[in-house]
Amino acid sequence: MAQTTEGAAAERAERPGSAPLPKGFRSAQAGWPELRRIPHPPGRVPLLGDVFGANVSTPVQDSMRFARSLGPIFRRKAFTKEIVFVAGARLGADMADESRFAKHVGLGVANLRPVAGDGLFTAYNHEPNWQLAHDILAPGFNRDAMAGYHRLMLDVAARLTERWDERERAGVAVDVPGDMTKLTLETIARTGFGHDFGSFERERPHPFVTAMVGTLAFAQRRNVVPGALAPLLLREASRRNDADMAYLNRTVDEVVAARRAESGGGELNDLLDRMLEVAHPETGERLTAENIRRQVITFLVAGHETTSGALSFALHYLARHPDVLARAQDEVDRVWAGKDEPAYEDVAKLRYLRRVLDESLRLWPTAPAFAREARQDTELGGEHPMRRGAWALVLTMMLHRDPEAWGPDPEAFDPDRFDPKAVRSRPAHVFKPFGTGARACIGRQFALHEATLVLGLLLRRYDLHGDPEYRLRVAERLTLMPEGLTLNLSRRATLDV
C-alpha cells in the first residue's frame, strides 16, 4: 500500500527543477531501455512471468539460485512487476558510486512505511526528516556514547548467560535465534530508550517481537502478491498487520510518554534523550512527535532484528568448525585474561573473533539486499543503460560470493578472508553487510561492538555443540535468520567465569 500511495507518489528528483519520478512501483521496463539484453529464468509465461518454480517463502534464496545460473545481472518478473537484480562484485561496486546512484526505497522497505514512515531506514531521499534525524542522532554512536552503552550491554548479556547456565545444568539445548532475539531487543531497548521488555522472564517472545515479525512478514508477502489481487488475497493478513502496527505504535508511545514525564532536560544518556531534547546544530529544527515515534520503531526493529541474525549465524558456524571455535576461545582467554568483565576498549582487541563475525556476515548478511536507483541517465558497468530513477536490487550475499573478489571457493567458511592483508588485496565495495553510501546503517558500530562482546562472553564461558544432523535452514522475513538452530552447551573446564 505504501509504495502506491504516499511513498513513491511523493518521490521527487534530487535536483531542483527536474521532473517528478513516475508514481507507484517502477517496473524495470520503464527504466532499462535495453532490458531484453538482461537474462531471465527459463520458462517465462505470458501474464504470469517467472512464477513457476518460485517459492513465495524464500524469494531471496530463489534469487541466489537464479544468480548462479544467469550471471551477475538478471531480471525476474511476477505478473506485472519486473525487477533487475545485480549479483556481481564489479556491477555492485559500480552501483556504490554515490555520484551516480542513491538509495531506492522500494519493495518490502516501502511496505514498512505505514509503520516506520520517514524513519532513517524507510525515508525517501527527498524527505527532510532523514537528514535532520541523522544529524541529531549520529553523535549517539560516537566513541563516548558507545563506551556509555557498554555497561548496559554487559548487564543484558549477564541475563543471557544466567539463562544459558540453567539450560546447561539441565542438559537442555538452547534456542539460539530465540535467545539472540531476546538479547538484542533488550540491548537496544535499554541502551537506546531506557526500557526493559522483560524478555528473559518470558518463555514466549515478547508481544513486541511477535508484532514486529508479523509486520516484516507482511511486507515480504506484499512483494510477491499482485497489487490488484492484494485486497482479496491479503484481507485477513492485512487485518492482522493493522493490529500489529497498532501494537507497535502503542508500545512506543508509552515508552516516549514515560520519558517525557521524567525528562528534566539534563544529561543526554541515550538516543531517546537526543530525539526529545536536541535541536539540529545549524537549523535549530527538532524532530516532531510523529517522527520520534517512527525513529524509535525503526531503531527497535532494525537495531535488534539484524544483530540477532548475525549472532545466530556466527554461533552456527562456530559450532560447526571446532578449529575456528578453539582459535577464537584462545584469543578471548588471552586478551581478556584476569578480567572479570571486559572493558569497552577490550572488545576491539578480539580481532580474530571479529573476523569470524565478518565471515558470517559475508555468507549470510542478515539484511540480504539493498536497492539503488540512478540519479541521472547512466550506464551500469558501461553496458546497461539506465534512465534516471531506474533501480536494481543488489543481492548482498551474491556480491559476497563472487569468485572474482573472494576466490575459487566463496561458499567455504574461512574467517582468514578478513585478515588485514587479505582485505587490502580485495577490490573496494565487495563487502556490504550494512548497505552502502550515505544511507548505510547508522548503527553499524553499535551492532559490531554488541555482537563481538556477546560472542566473546559466550566463548569464554561455554563450549558449543551443534546437532550433527542439523542442516542450515534460512528463514526470510525481509531479514534472514537461521531456522530451528539449537546448540548444546558445556561449561568450559579451563575457566570458572
Image: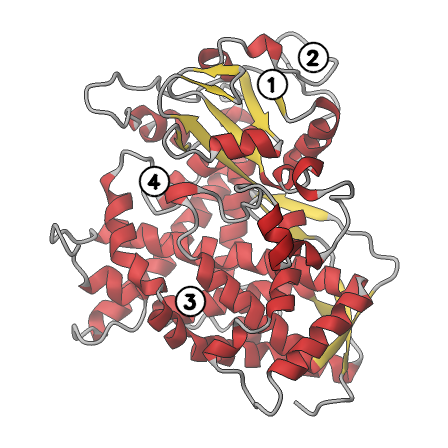
- Relative vertical location of residue 50 with respect to residue 175 in this rendering, above or below: above
Label 2 neighbourhood size at 10 Å, few (<14), some (14-19), many (20+)?
A: some
**What type is the residue that disc 1 sits on?**
Lys
How far apart are the two marked residues, 1 and 3, measured between alpha carbons?
39 Å
Disc 1 to disc 2: CB gap under 8 Å: yes
Relative to 315, is 123 on the left or the right?
left
The alpha-carbon separation of the residues under discs 1 and 2 comes to: 8 Å
How far is the residue under mark 1 from the one under mark 4? 26 Å
Q: Position of residue 310 (x, y in %)?
A: 60, 57
**Residue shown at 64%/59% (left/top)?**
419
In this figure, which residue is indicated by the disc labeled 4? 123
Mark number for residue 189? Answer: 3
Which image quarter is the C terminus in?
bottom right
Left or right of 387 in this view: 322:
right
Element on which disc 4 rests: loop
What residue lies at 46% left-to-right and 54% top-to-bottom? 301
Q: Earlier in the sequence, mark 1 or mark 3?
A: 1
Q: Where residue 300 sits in the image (x, y, percent)?
A: 43, 58
Q: Residue 44 bears which disc, if any?
A: 2
Which mark is first along the chain, 4 or 1? 1
User: Neighbour class for label 1 at 10 Å: few (<14), some, many (≥20)?
Assistant: many
Residue for badge 1: 77
User: Of the residues shown, which amino acid type is indicated by label 3?
Assistant: Ala
Label 3 and label 2: CA atoms lie apart by 46 Å
Query: How crowded is the residue under tag 4: few (<14 C-alpha within 10 Å), some, or many (20+)?
Result: many
The answer to the question of whether label 4 and label 3 lie on touching residues, with beta carbons closer than 8 A, is no
Q: Is 231 or 181 nearer to us in this picture?
A: 181
Q: Looking at the image, do the residues carrying marks 1 and 4 touch, with CB atoms under 8 Å apart? A: no
